[in-house]
Structures are given as structure tokens and as C-alpha cells.
Amino acid sequence: MKVKVLVVDDNVIVRAGLRTVLSRLQDPVEIFEAGDGQEAIEVAQANNVDVVLLDVQMPRMNGLDALPTLALTSAVIMLTNRDDTETIRRSLTSGARGYLVHGQLGADEIAGALATCRAGGMVLGREAANAVQAGPVSTPRRLNPLRARLTEREADVLEAAASGMSNDEIAQAQFLSPRTVKNYLNSAYPKLGVHNRVEAILAWLDAEPS
């Protein structure tokens, strides 16, 4: 019997990348898609999906708001670029069976995550495991204040660029095309009052919380 998997992300390129990975799994998978939390609830209920791969930041209804409802009938794995402690803990306390960050998993990891969650287990990426081990008294990671000026995708791409990653590396890690990465960077420049990649990276690094 095919495992029914719902991929939820507002970025169609991310969904296409995950669909490609899922289609290559050894065990047969029936794939559904949704672009926001509200649509995810509707698709999940209409098709009795087994596993939901759920992004966090989306329009109309975000993943965290949709999670409690989705978790009632499906095993939910958060699959996102967000790695801050607050988001991770809220996800796990709201019913998520797993928390994974884009760029750190391939077909084998996804196959293992699906099997583990369907069996009632929990799958945690490195960031999620660290957040759990840190305990409730740990200080959440302070986000770069420049994020407030950008969309989440723009900020994630710029943060990756500031860490030294090339456009091709960012594209592979975030399930984007190199051209899309470049477009996100270009759209971020005027919002930050800079003119090129170097200036944007310097601005990002200067604004990083100490």
C-alpha cells in the first residue's frame, strides 16, 4: 500500500524538489501538495494522508497554526529553514513527530523519517535535538534584526550567503534554483540600502547579535 505524503510549502520550487526526492524512494509514495496551512488541512482531511511535511512560514495560515489540526490525523514532520529554538519547541509541543531543516537530508534521510514517524517514533535534526537537550531554561537564538526588513526567503538566502555559501550551494541546500537565489538577493538589496552582494553580506554581519 502506498504511503500518502502531503508536502506543504508556499514555494513551488521547494515542493517540486521534495516531490522529486519522494518519487525516488524505494517504497511507493502517493504525493499531495498544498501551498499554505489552510489548504494543507483541507487536502489532508480529504485524502487521509499518512505523513505531512510541513513548512513554518506561509501566507494565509502558517505551519504552526495548522499543526495542531494536522497532527490529529497524520504524522507531521516540520521541514523548514527555521532553526530557532522557540519555533522548534513550539512545533514539538504542538504535536509534530519530527523537525528537520532543509539542506541536511537526502532520500535516505527522508525515507527513514517517514518510516520512523509512521511507527510512532520521533525524528529530530541536529538543531531540534540541541533545542530539546538544552532544556527549558536555555536562551533562544537571537535573530538578525535585518530579518524584519526582508521576507523569510530573502533573509534565509542572505544568511546563507553571509556564511560563505555560493549561490549554487544555497540553491542545493534550500531546494531553489541558482537563478531564484540570485533573485532573492537582488530583491533584498534595496530593502537594506545596499547595491551588491558584498555590501549586503557586510550589512548582515554587522547587524548580527553578539
Image (cartoon, helix red, strand yellow):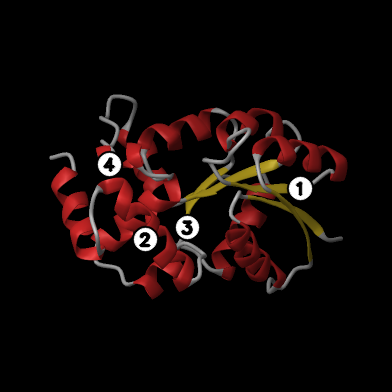
In which quadrant of the rendered image does the C terminus lie? top left
Say which residue label 2 marks: 186
Q: Which residue is drawn at 72% across and 41% down?
A: 40
Marks 3 and 1, how far apart at CA: 21 Å
Compared with 37, 156 (above or below) is: below
Name the amino acid type tagged 3. His
Residue 102 is tagged as: 3
Quadrant of the image containing the N terminus: bottom right
Confirm whether residue 126 shows in the render.
no
Q: Residue 50: give its label.
A: 1
Question: Nearer the N terminus, badge 2 or badge 1?
Answer: 1
Residue situated in front as seen by the camera: 82 or 184: 184
Mark 4 and mark 1: Cα distance apart in space = 38 Å
Name the residue at 64% across, 32% down: 66
Q: What residue type is labelled 2?
A: Asn
Residue under circle 4? 146
Task: Identify which residue, 162 or 28, lies in the foreground.
Answer: 162
Mark 3 or mark 1, earlier in chain? 1
Q: In this view, does 149 lie to the left or right of 49?
A: left
Of labels 3 and 4, earlier in sequence is 3
- For this rendering, which residue is in front, 8 or 203? 203
Q: What element carries label 3?
A: loop
Q: What amino acid is found at the position of numbered circle 1 in the picture? A: Asp
